[in-house]
Image (cartoon, rainbow, N blue to C red):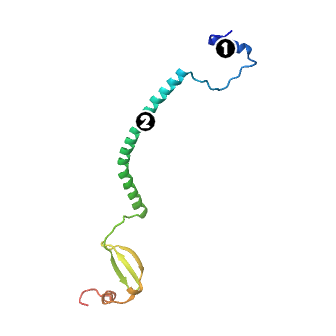
Amino acid sequence: MPLSTPEERLKHLESNADRIEHESYVRYFSDSELETKKEEFSSISIEISSIEEQKKKSDAEFKALLTPIKLDAKKLLLELRTKGEPVTGEVYVIIDHNNNEAGYYSPDGNLIRQRGLYPKERQVTLMSVNRSGNLTGTND
């Protein structure tokens, strides 16, 4: 005698089971349910693709906005770390034979750095004699 309705099947199972347990299992789809799921998946995949395309475009736009700001921030951070800004230009080297040092000065007259004299710089020149002679420039 075949059990025709779901209620009859359930009643038959309950009456013949040794015990009833609660657990997870896979309920397999019918062919029509499987086709419906495939159509849903296809529709959702197309929607995902469309949204990801929009995301790529907006990411590119945001990157274009953000890149120059990040470059400015990087430059400012470097300036804050070094407590100054990099400058390329003329510097003035003044050799001090009394202390055997060479001083590098900016056009503003600020000492940038000092170092010891190189061997070829230790040779005294006429200019260095005039500077080291404590001349004031007024009728000396």
Question: Position of 24 compared to 107: left or right?
Answer: right
For the point 50% across and 27% down, which residue is it?
A: 38
Upstream in sequence: badge 2 or badge 1: 1
Q: Is residue 97 visible?
A: no
Q: Residue at x 71, y 14 (%)?
A: 14
- Marks 2/1 in contact by CB < 8 Å: the verdict is no
Of 91 and 22, the residue lying toward us = 22
Residue 123 coordinates in the image, percent (x, y): 37, 89
Tell me if residue 89 comes above or below residue 21 in the rendering: below
Task: Give the SS element for disc 1.
Answer: helix
> Residue at the spot x=71%, y=22% of the render?
21
Q: Quadrant of the C terminus?
A: bottom left
Q: Can residue 23 be seen?
A: yes
Q: Which sits in the foreground, 72 or 99?
A: 72
Residue where numbered disc 1 is placed: 10
**Residue 1, placed above or below residue 108:** above
* Amino acid at dot 2: Ser
Q: Looking at the picture, which amino acid does disc 1 mark? A: Leu
In the displayed structure, would residue 5 be above or below residue 95? above
Can you identify the residue that label 2 sits on?
49
**Left or right: where 41 falls relative to 110:** right
Depth check, front residue: 130 or 77:
77
The CA distance from mark 2 to mark 1 is: 44 Å
In the shown orientation, is residue 85 left or right of residue 39? left
Q: Position of residue 72 (x, y in %)?
A: 36, 55
Name the residue at 33% across, 89% down: 125
Q: Position of residue 15 (x, y in %)?
A: 73, 13
Residue 82 spot, x, y in % from top left? 42, 64
The N terminus appears in which quarter of the rendering? top right
Q: Secondary structure at mark 2?
A: helix
